Image: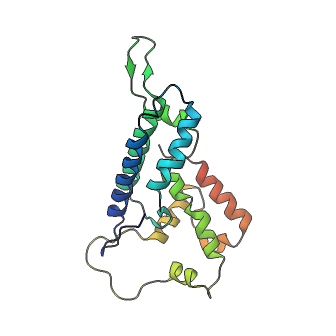
């Protein structure tokens, strides 16, 4: 289950590879997902234990752009539509695909993008390690030299700061905040309770 890296530090190829593997597993169980012999809860467990870990392998290190978030959400919507099936329209009696809002209401767990954003739990552990640990030094290190021309890629630490802004901790030094385990736990819980529409 190796990861795919490029010399441009782009995560696009990695996500493409993860989605390809996730699709392979999805197609291997696709006949089980619409089955009336299985409960919806069991189908969701199949998704969360067989398909989702393959897609999200190594996701703690990803810096997602909006386009990549969208690709991950589209994949999850495809699987959930297969699990929950079409909805019968009460007026016409015809069956139609569920809308995204309806899927979010039926699927009570956090979607895959917010599972990725739960990396804040891991980064909190690293921030409390202290300067003597190599993992901490890699996390906070600022590379020397000049950046190449063109628009720069989103850095992993910048994506952590964006996650903080989304849950209302804007302007707070995240390394200092991580030292207080209770406040950090509250931040991670707030992030996991948010839903991406």
Residue 25, can we see it?
Answer: yes
Residue lying at 43% horizontally and 29% vertically, measured from the top left? 98
Left or right: 69, with 139 as reference point: left
Q: Residue 2: which quarter of the image? A: bottom left
Residue lying at 58% horizontally and 39% vertically, measured from the top left? 108
Q: Is residue 32 above or below residue 113?
A: above
Q: Position of residue 36 (x, y in %)?
A: 51, 25
Q: Residue 65: which quarter of the image? A: bottom left
Q: Is residue 36 above or below residue 170?
A: above
Q: Position of residue 61 (x, y in %)?
A: 47, 67
Q: In this orientation, which residue lies closer to the viewer: 17 or 88?
A: 17
Q: In this orientation, which residue lies closer to the viewer: 127 or 75?
A: 75
Q: Is residue 157 above or below residue 66?
A: below
Q: Position of residue 191 (x, y in %)?
A: 59, 54
Q: How is the image coloured?
A: rainbow
Residue 172, can we see it?
Answer: no
């Amino acid at each position: 289950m190796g990861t795919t890296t490029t010399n441009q530090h782009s995560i696009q190829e990695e996500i493409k590879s993860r989605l390809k593997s996730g699709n392979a597993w999805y197609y291997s169980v696709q006949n089980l997902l619409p089955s009336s012999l299985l409960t919806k809860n069991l189908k969701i467990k199949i998704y969360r234990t067989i398909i989702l870990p393959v897609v999200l392998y190594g996701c703690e290190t990803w810096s997602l752009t909006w386009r990549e978030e969208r690709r991950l959400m589209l994949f999850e919507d495809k699987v959930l539509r297969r699990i929950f099936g079409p909805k019968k329209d009460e007026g016409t009696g015809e069956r139609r695909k569920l809308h995204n809002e309806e899927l979010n209401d039926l699927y009570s767990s956090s979607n895959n993008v917010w599972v990725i954003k739960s990396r804040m739990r891991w980064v909190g552990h690293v921030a409390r390690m202290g300067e003597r640990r190599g993992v901490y030094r890699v996390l906070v290190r600022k590379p020397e030299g000049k950046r190449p021309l063109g628009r720069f890629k989103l850095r992993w630490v910048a994506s952590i700061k964006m996650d903080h802004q989304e849950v209302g901790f804007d302007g707070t030094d995240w390394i200092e905040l991580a030292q207080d385990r209770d406040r950090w736990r509250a931040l991670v819980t707030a992030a996991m309770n948010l839903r991406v529409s």
